[in-house]
Image (spheres, helix red, strand yellow):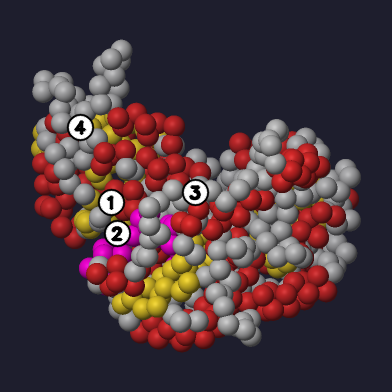
């Protein structure tokens, strides 16, 4: 047997560089790295020698590097990914939040944190967490509940099985998610005689599992029996490349489509069967259809509480639930009639089996009325004053073209964008499974790296910006252009409104309600400019619109700051649905008592079992 003598780290890098997509590209695009004593001597040396065969990029924070990698994988529809390596200790645990984000969103990322010495000779090493009762534990065990596959590499030859397992998970449509290979730092540097065939190029195919034909028959019968069916389009539609298939299916059978955060832009907003966002942050049109639907057909959705109005939205008596999903865990939730399959394959089979079946046409007036309301909310203000988020969105929409992708993650903007942004197909990127503050700027960089041909607009509030902004410097260094629209409402405006809606008093969210000696005056323009970005402040909505248009030609990030009204949320009178946020059962104020009474009345409408 021909062998190649390499260190374990050299072997890992060489093997990863040989894993290919069906399009002939490396499956692992490259590696984000911050080096420390847990990975610099092993993986650092191996990556330096690999050069362009496995590119390495330096970021500013392990969590945000991983966010960039996750956004890249999401934008690539899980068909190409990036890896992230860190040292042991805080460098590793910084990535745990990102791993959770990827796990919730079913997105692949390869995390390679350094670990303690497998031989234990120098224990405890710098940054080592010691368990007083279990000698096998390290800080990296924190990754176990937020990884789809976890392995601790304690001998070089363990890579012979661990690496193929890692790729199998990240290319599996059902089990796709983050993989953590916890790499003991001494093992990284140990040599082994590797079989030469281990490094031969391998192509990984993303499988398209077909459904059980009996389940197809059951779903077809349910659709034909329905009078008011509705489709809930989730992210699985996009990952399956089933956008056009969904459009054809909905059109052929007259079934309206409503959207989740992950599924928004599977159909362009202009498509006549797209009735907008569902649920808590939903449109009046979508929620009207959802409330009356006698059959709810989920396609690639987890049926998260925002989508279902905490299971109080689909309120028609006797309504049934169908769930098309690649994983049985998701397909069988809440007593659904599960169709375990790839979304594209399932829709094609259902389309054939349904023949010329057509449901009664949905009320087109609902859609027209909602889009007219969107235009009104997003119109430029007629009077002076701080603008709303809706008006900010309208300005950006008017200043961008069909190729623009709006992206965000947390706060008020996700709900407002889901309601009001009118994307072309693929023109929306939202991290709302984990709603992780701090994802936005790093995510915008990863998104732009994956989709360089499209304009990327990053919406971020001042709270999220303060949590994680350092990858702005990385984007400047790498000349990755995107536009950041930074809405400054001087605190956590979204949670401040939720606090009061739940019967509480304004407390510890807006700076004006915080226990501070002096109110902060943060110069976000100066801060962003100090990292090399083109940074400006918009005086008003008209100025914002002009500045967004001016950003198109730059080859570095542009940051546009605009002050907004912290009291105005995305829930307009004709849209939105209840969300189950627990309210204190007892309290001293009348406001709290009224909030609890409203809570009980809404909770009584929850339909948890079909």
Q: Nearer the viewer, residue 246 or 605?
A: 605
What is the C-alpha distance between the residues marked 3 and 2? 25 Å
Is residue 448 among what the camera can see? Answer: yes
Instruction: Give the quarter of the image for residue 537.
Output: bottom left
In the rendered view, tell whether residue 523 sits above or below residue 355: below
Residue ID for mark 3? 508
The boundaries of the magenta stretch are: 457-479
Dot 1 or dot 2: first in sequence order is 1
Q: Nearer the viewer, residue 430 or 356?
A: 430
Callout in the foreground (3, 4): 3
Labels 3 and 2 touching (C-beta < 8 A) = no
Of callouts 3 and 2, the N-terminal one: 2
Q: Is residue 474 magenta?
A: yes
Eye-nearest disc, 3 or 2: 3
Q: Is residue 15 left or right of residue 368?
A: left
Q: Position of residue 446 (x, y in %)?
A: 37, 61
Q: Position of residue 526 (x, y in %)?
A: 29, 71
Distance Cα–Cα, label 1 vs label 4:
17 Å
On screen, residue 273 versus residue 438, left or right, reads right
Q: Which residue is mark 2?
A: 470
Front-most of residues 222 and 509: 509
Q: Are marks 1 and 4 in contact (CB under 8 Å)?
A: no
Q: Secondary structure at mark 2?
A: loop
N-terminal-most mark, 1 or 4: 1
State the CA–CA distance, disc 3 to disc 4. Answer: 33 Å
| Figure quadrant of residue 441 | bottom left
Q: Position of residue 484 (x, y in %)?
A: 41, 70
């Amino acid at each position: 047997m021909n062998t190649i003598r390499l260190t374990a780290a050299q072997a890992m890098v060489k093997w990863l560089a040989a894993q290919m997509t069906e399009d002939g590209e490396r499956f692992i695009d490259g590696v984000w790295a911050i080096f420390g004593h847990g990975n610099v001597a092993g993986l650092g040396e191996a990556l330096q020698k690999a050069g362009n065969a496995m590119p390495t990029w330096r970021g500013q924070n392990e969590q945000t590097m991983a966010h960039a990698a996750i956004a890249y994988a999401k934008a690539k529809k899980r068909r190409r990914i990036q890896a992230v390596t860190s040292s042991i200790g805080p460098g590793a645990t910084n990535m745990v939040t990102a791993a959770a984000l990827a796990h919730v969103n079913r997105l692949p990322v390869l995390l390679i944190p350094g670990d303690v010495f497998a031989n234990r000779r120098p224990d405890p090493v710098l940054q080592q967490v010691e368990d007083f009762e279990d000698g096998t534990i390290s800080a990296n065990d924190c990754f176990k509940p937020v990884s789809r596959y976890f392995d601790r590499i304690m001998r070089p030859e363990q890579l012979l099985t661990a690496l193929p397992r890692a790729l199998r998970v990240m290319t599996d449509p059902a089990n796709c998610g983050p993989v953590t290979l916890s790499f003991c730092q001494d093992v990284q540097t140990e040599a082994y005689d590797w079989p030469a065939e281990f490094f031969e190029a391998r192509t990984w195919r993303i499988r398209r599992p077909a459904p059980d034909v009996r389940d197809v028959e059951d779903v077809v019968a349910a659709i034909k029996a329905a009078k008011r069916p509705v489709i809930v389009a989730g992210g699985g539609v996009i990952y399956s490349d089933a956008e056009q298939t969904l459009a054809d299916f909905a059109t052929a059978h007259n079934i309206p489509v409503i959207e989740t955060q992950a599924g928004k832009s599977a159909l362009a907003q202009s498509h006549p069967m797209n009735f907008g966002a569902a649920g808590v942050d939903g449109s009046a049109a979508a929620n009207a259809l959802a409330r009356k639907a006698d059959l709810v057909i989920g396609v690639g959705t987890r049926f998260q509480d925002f989508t279902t109005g905490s299971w109080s939205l689909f309120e028609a008596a006797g309504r049934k639930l169908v769930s098309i999903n690649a994983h049985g865990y998701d397909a069988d939730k809440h007593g659904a009639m599960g169709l375990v399959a790839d979304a594209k394959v399932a829709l094609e089979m259902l389309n054939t089996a349904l023949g010329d079946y057509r449901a009664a046409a949905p009320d087109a007036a609902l859609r027209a009325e909602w889009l007219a309301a969107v235009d009104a909310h997003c119109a430029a203000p007629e009077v002076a004053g701080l603008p709303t988020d809706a008006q900010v969105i309208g300005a950006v929409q008017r200043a961008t073209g069909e190729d623009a992708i709006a992206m965000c993650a947390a706060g008020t903007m996700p709900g407002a964008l889901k309601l009001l942004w009118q994307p072309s197909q693929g023109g929306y990127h939202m991290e709302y499974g984990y709603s992780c503050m701090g994802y936005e700027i790093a995510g915008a960089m990863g998104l732009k790296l994956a989709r360089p041909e499209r304009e990327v607009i990053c919406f971020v509030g001042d709270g999220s910006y303060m949590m994680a902004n350092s990858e702005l410097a990385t984007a400047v260094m790498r000349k990755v252009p995107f536009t950041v629209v930074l809405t400054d409402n001087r605190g956590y405006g979204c949670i401040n409104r939720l606090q009061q809606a739940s019967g509480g008093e304004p407390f510890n969210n807006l700076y004006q309600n915080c226990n501070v000696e002096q109110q902060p005056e943060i110069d976000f323009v100066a801060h962003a400019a100090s990292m090399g970005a083109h940074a400006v402040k918009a005086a008003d909505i008209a100025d914002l619109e002009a500045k967004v248009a001016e950003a198109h030609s730059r080859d570095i990030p542009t940051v546009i700051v605009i002050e907004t009204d912290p009291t105005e949320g995305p829930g307009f009178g004709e849209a939105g649905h209840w969300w189950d946020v627990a309210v204190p059962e007892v309290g001293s104020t009348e406001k709290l008592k009224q909030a609890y009474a409203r809570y009980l009345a809404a909770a009584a409408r929850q339909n948890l079992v079909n």
